[in-house]
Image: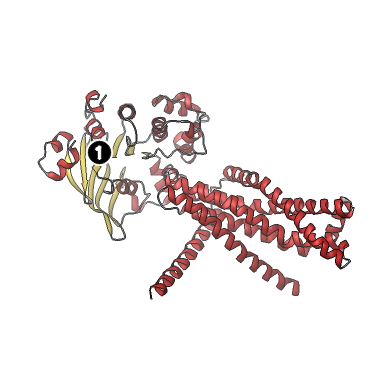
């Protein structure tokens, strides 16, 4: 069963123009390889923005610059009103508590149980949970959101790829972030599991009112989840618009993304 | 010409590696001295480092004690000095053989373990996930492991020494009819603080070198699964080489103190 036949595109409910992420003239190169070449982007509150690009086009580099995992050569990166480059480590960590990150390979900690994986982000952000003495209900809630409440005491090695991705999603939302970054959320998953993950992404956004930046090369995922899309080509935002607008384009570089 | 260029390149790479390792060590001291301190993880790592190497150290120590005594015995009998056996074996094991053999065994076990574990965490983005969740991965993963190795190695050396002496006493009991009590009394009479203190201090440095190289290679692993294997392998090679360098310096320095 195909994803696109079952899930209607998400309707934009929040019309607020408050900017959650602003990237301006972002440059990043590795030696002679210029990966980002003046990339610009704005993500508004409650919006689902998909950034599409070929493998190696700099999508992951861009998303890592957003959370301070990489330092850009130049450019401005503002997240939730804070300029990442100007933040000290303490403030950056504070800001990160408002950002959920779903890694491409799930990135669950191998040596910890599912429960410990989910509790791990809470250990540094006690302020957010003032008055909370028992973390179990929070872990349970996050796991129930992804339909895996029974896996609490399992180790990551006992989980399937799809389950790991769902647990990683639960970990990304445990701090109740304002912004969730998805790095290739459906890559390496079968179509049915990919559909489940997309469904969960939508339900989480609906429940918590988060903004989401999704980087992917999965056209079906982009079509279903995106309200707006940016095509990242040669390190710049080559094209921008809704899925329908981009599909209708006659530009060969844009068409290359949607060709079956 | 090509060979000369290759040599220059290798020399340059060697010094860059030394510089990187030194910077890594400095970063360790800085992070180890600043809060928050990860006591729980330190305890966990100390237990794992000790527990992981205990059987290996015991087996090696026992065999070294047996072999050293069996091979020395005929020569000492020839010179009529077999009664010196406990003194000779005791001093050589405590001052040199015990610490070096234990450290070499541990470099194979601990340094490769750290290299592979952290390398795998790097490749699967677990270290990035930790950073995004607001935890300093260097402090949580590297500082705790280096400290655990530094603190545990002297204990393992003492344990290995005792097992080696037991192996040696077993040979003396079976071949020379020397009681265990007499053997150990003679050994402890022969040992002075001048034998014990430098060996113990040296063991701390051995542990530090093993932890440092293992973590350095693992933490700096290149992308890809091949990088994990390379990290584990080069960690052992580098740790073993550095152990001999540290041993030479330790012997040199303790000799200066003896002369004073």
Along the viewing direction, whichever of B126 and A162 lies nearer the viewer: A162
Q: Residue at x 14, y 36 (%)?
A: A247
Residue at the farthest left position:
A250
Comparing A114 with A84, the one in front is A114
> Residue sitting at 51 percent across and 46 percent down?
B117
Give percent across and percent down for residue A104: 36, 40
Residue ID at (30%, 48%): A62
Q: Nearer the viewer, residue B24 or A18?
A: B24
Indicate how the structure is coloured in the image: secondary structure
- Residue A70 in the image, given as x and y percentages of width and height: 36, 51
Q: State the image quarter where residue A180 is shown.
A: top left
Viewer-closest of B63 and B74: B74
Residue A254 position in % (x across, y down):
16, 42
Q: Is residue B223 above or below residue A10?
A: below
User: Is residue A61 toward the left or the right of residue B119 in the image?
Assistant: left
Residue B136 makes an appearance in the image: no
Residue that numbered label 1 is attached to: A50
């Amino acid at each position: 069963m195909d994803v696109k036949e079952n899930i209607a595109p998400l309707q934009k409910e929040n019309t607020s123009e408050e900017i959650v992420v602003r990237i301006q003239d972002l440059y990043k190169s590795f030696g002679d390889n210029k990966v980002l070449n003046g990339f610009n982007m704005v993500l508004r509150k409650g919006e689902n923005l998909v950034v599409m690009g070929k493998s190696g086009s700099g999508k992951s580099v861009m998303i890592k610059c957003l959370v301070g995992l990489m330092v850009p050569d130049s450019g401005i990166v503002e997240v939730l009103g804070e300029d990442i480059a100007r933040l000290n480590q303490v403030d950056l960590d504070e800001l990160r508590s408002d950002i959920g990150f779903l890694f491409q390979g799930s990135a669950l900690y191998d040596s910890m149980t599912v429960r410990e994986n989910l509790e791990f982000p809470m250990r540094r952000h006690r302020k957010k949970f003032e008055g909370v003495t028992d973390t179990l209900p929070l872990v349970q809630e996050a796991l129930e959101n992804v339909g895996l409440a029974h896996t609490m005491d399992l180790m990551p090695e006992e989980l399937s790829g799809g389950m790991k991705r769902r647990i990683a999603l639960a970990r990304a939302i445990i701090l109740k972030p304002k912004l969730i970054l998805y790095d290739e959320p459906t890559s390496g998953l079968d179509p049915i599991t990919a559909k489940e993950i997309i469904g969960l992404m939508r339900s989480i956004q609906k429940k918590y009112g988060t903004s989401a930046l999704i980087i992917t090369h999965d056209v079906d995922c982009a079509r279903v989840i995106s309200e707006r899309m940016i095509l990242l080509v040669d390190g710049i935002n080559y094209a921008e618009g809704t899925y329908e607008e981009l599909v209708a384009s006659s530009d060969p570089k844009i068409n290359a993304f949607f060709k079956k | 010409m090509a060979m000369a260029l290759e040599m220059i390149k290798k020399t340059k790479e060697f010094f860059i590696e030394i510089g990187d390792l030194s910077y890594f060590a400095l970063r360790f001291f800085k992070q180890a001295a600043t809060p928050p301190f990860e006591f729980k993880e330190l305890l966990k790592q100390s237990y794992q480092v000790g527990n992981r190497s205990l059987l290996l150290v015991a087996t090696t120590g026992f065999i070294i004690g047996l072999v050293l005594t069996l091979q020395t015995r005929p020569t000492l009998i020839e010179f009529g000095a077999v009664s010196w056996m406990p003194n000779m074996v005791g001093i050589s094991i405590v001052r040199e053989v015990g610490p070096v053999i234990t450290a070499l065994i541990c470099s194979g076990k601990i340094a490769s373990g750290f290299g592979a574990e952290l390398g795998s965490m790097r490749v699967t983005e677990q270290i990035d996930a930790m950073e995004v969740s607001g935890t300093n991965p260097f402090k949580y993963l590297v500082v705790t492991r280096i400290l655990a190795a530094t603190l545990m190695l002297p204990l393992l050396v003492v344990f290995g020494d005792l097992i080696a002496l037991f192996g040696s006493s077993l040979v003396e009991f079976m071949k020379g009819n020397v009681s265990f009590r007499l053997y150990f009394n003679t050994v402890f009479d022969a040992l002075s603080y001048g034998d014990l203190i430098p060996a113990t201090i040296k063991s701390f440095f051995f542990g530090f070198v093993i932890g440092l190289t293992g973590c350095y290679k693992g933490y700096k692993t290149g992308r890809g699964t091949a990088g994990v294997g390379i990290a584990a392998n080069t960690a052992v090679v580098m740790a073993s080489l550095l152990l001999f360098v540290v041993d030479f310096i330790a012997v040199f320095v303790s000799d200066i103190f003896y002369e004073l």
